[in-house]
């Protein structure tokens, strides 16, 4: 219905045709396509979210009181997913956000279709569900962005004249819709597309980004109602000496996030030679090893580091539950291992959980520190350290908890976290990964320094 609406517009506009009306018709077509694609993305995202919830519940049910089963389920599961990714759905590995960002600069439409096709979208959907079903420490946001951009890419062929400008516009709109759908956070979706993906933007791009984000947001609102990702947090941070801990928490989180990002970008620097050889020459065997390590971390944490650790983070943010002191470092390692294994999956949600764990560590160190408030501060500091996008980090933490009262400390933490991260990781993680991906797709010469990635394909 929406896709046919522009034919009516054309008949009306072309009567007494002049160039200005042609531009208006093209703009109307584009807006209709963006709205339709945003609605489709919203519906797919709801199905994706339901599937992830059930996959996580299945894993929890199978391993309840039988955590030793993870020693079989995790390695076999990760190895099987990597096998399917490489043989059936090549191009579906990793987060999905770097692939989308790389697509904005690709000049060959065939190259764009290698990462933003319906086949890739289906593979991303199914294999990410499989990752949750075997306990991988991954998130849904990166896959949702790639799926959303694939929907935009396909819909953009319907009656619009293809160009590099339109391609960029479609991917930016898809990124905004994807983050909106993943976290029910339209403002964060807009800021992510503008701050992280676009770098610089025009008013035309901003309008399209906002249209896509709020189109998908309204779809979620109509079908699911208003549901903040982590629920409603009533945390506050009263003025006092405790504020002196905010920059400390933010800087620690930013440095930790920068280290995480640097390892993802240049894993060869941090892994022993035999492990690098295994990753390059026997990726399925490497995934098997990663699964064993993931299961071991799960046993140590009593099962808290599996999946996105949504429940653990939610309890800390909304109920002030203090997480174990070792939760943050164990979740940090579990997310690194899951990502480097080569399976599809995002790093947003697990990174948020790491940040929450880091924030609650201050409750162990300094009695009386408000747990929920520092969980938000830690989440903003660490997450901004990973992505180096302070506006996005601030918006996403506030929208996920529906708590504008914490805007100032969260914003301070996001800015300081970004600054601290840049001391460790010079280039934002998604930009670095997008450049690596472009080198592979366009077959540019690989650098010969130690900055090469592992044998697993770039994210």
Image (cartoon, rainbow, N blue to C red):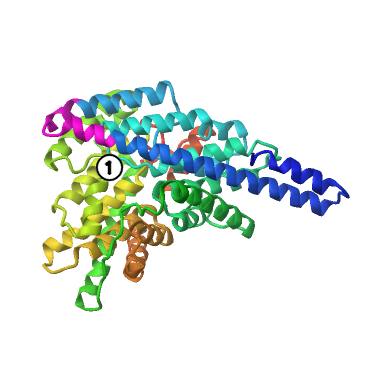
In the rendered view of the protein, which quadrant contains the C terminus? top left
The image shows residue 139 at horizontal and vertical percentages of 34, 42
Res 22 seen here: yes
Up the image or down, 272 lies above or below 166; here it is above
Q: Residue 347's spot in the image, x, y percent?
A: 34, 45
Is residue 67 located in the magenta-colored stretch of the structure? yes
The extreme right residue here reads 16
Is 177 displayed left or right of 250 in the figure?
right
| Circle count | 1
Say if 365 sits above or below 172 in the image: below
Nearest to the observer: residue 2 or residue 323: 2
Q: Residue drawn 76% across and 51% down?
A: 23
The percent coordinates of residue 358 (x first, y second) are 22, 56
Magenta residues (range): 56-72
Query: In the picture shown, does residue 382 fall above or below 436?
Result: below
- Residue placed most toward the observer, 205 or 252: 205
Residue annotated with mark 1: 335
Residue 99 seen in the figure: no
Q: Residue at x 27, y 58 (%)?
A: 253
* Residue 169 % position (x, y): 60, 48
Q: Secondary structure at mark 1?
A: helix
């Amino acid at each position: 219905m929406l896709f046919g609406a522009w034919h009516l517009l054309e008949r009306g506009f072309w009567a007494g045709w002049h160039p200005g009306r042609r531009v208006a018709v093209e703009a109307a077509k584009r807006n209709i396509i963006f709205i339709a694609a945003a609605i489709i993305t919203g519906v797919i995202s709801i199905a994706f979210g339901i599937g992830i919830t059930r996959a996580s519940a299945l894993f929890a049910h199978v391993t309840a009181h039988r955590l030793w089963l993870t020693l079989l389920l995790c390695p076999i599961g990760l190895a099987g997913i990597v096998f399917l990714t490489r043989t059936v759905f090549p191009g579906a590995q990793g987060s999905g956000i770097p692939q989308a960002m790389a697509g904005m600069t690709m000049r060959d439409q065939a190259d764009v279709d290698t990462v933003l096709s319906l086949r890739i979208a289906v593979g991303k959907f199914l294999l990410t569900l499989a990752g949750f079903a075997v306990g991988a420490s991954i998130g849904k946001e990166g896959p949702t962005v790639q799926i959303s951009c694939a929907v935009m890419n396909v819909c953009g062929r319907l009656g619009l004249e293809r160009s590099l400008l339109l391609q960029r516009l479609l991917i930016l709109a898809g990124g905004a819709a994807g983050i909106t759908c993943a976290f029910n956070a339209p403002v964060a979706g807009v800021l992510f597309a503008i701050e992280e993906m676009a770098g610089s933007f025009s008013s035309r791009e901003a309008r399209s980004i906002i249209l896509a984000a709020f189109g998908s947001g309204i779809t979620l609102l109509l079908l699911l109602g208003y549901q903040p990702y982590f629920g409603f947090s009533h945390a506050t941070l009263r003025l006092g000496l405790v504020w002196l801990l905010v920059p400390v928490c933010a800087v620690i989180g930013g440095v930790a996030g920068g280290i995480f990002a640097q390892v993802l970008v240049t894993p060869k620097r941090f892994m022993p030679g035999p492990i690098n050889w295994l990753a390059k020459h026997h990726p399925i065997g490497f995934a098997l090893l990663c699964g064993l390590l993931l299961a071991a971390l799960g046993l140590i944490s009593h099962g808290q580091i599996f999946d996105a650790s949504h429940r653990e983070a939610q309890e800390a943010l909304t109920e002030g539950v203090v997480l174990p002191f070792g939760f943050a470092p164990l979740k940090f390692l579990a997310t690194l291992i899951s990502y480097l294994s080569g399976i599809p999956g995002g790093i947003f949600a697990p990174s948020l959980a790491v940040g929450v764990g880091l924030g609650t560590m201050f409750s162990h160190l300094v009695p009386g520190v408000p747990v929920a408030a520092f969980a938000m501060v830690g989440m903003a500091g660490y997450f901004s350290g990973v992505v180096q996008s302070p506006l996005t980090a601030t918006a996403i933490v506030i929208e996920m908890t529906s708590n504008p009262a914490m805007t100032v400390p969260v914003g301070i933490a996001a800015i300081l976290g970004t600054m601290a991260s840049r001391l460790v990781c010079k280039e934002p993680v998604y930009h670095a990964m997008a450049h690596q991906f472009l080198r592979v797709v366009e077959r540019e010469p690989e650098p010969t320094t130690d900055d090469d990635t592992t044998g697993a394909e770039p994210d």
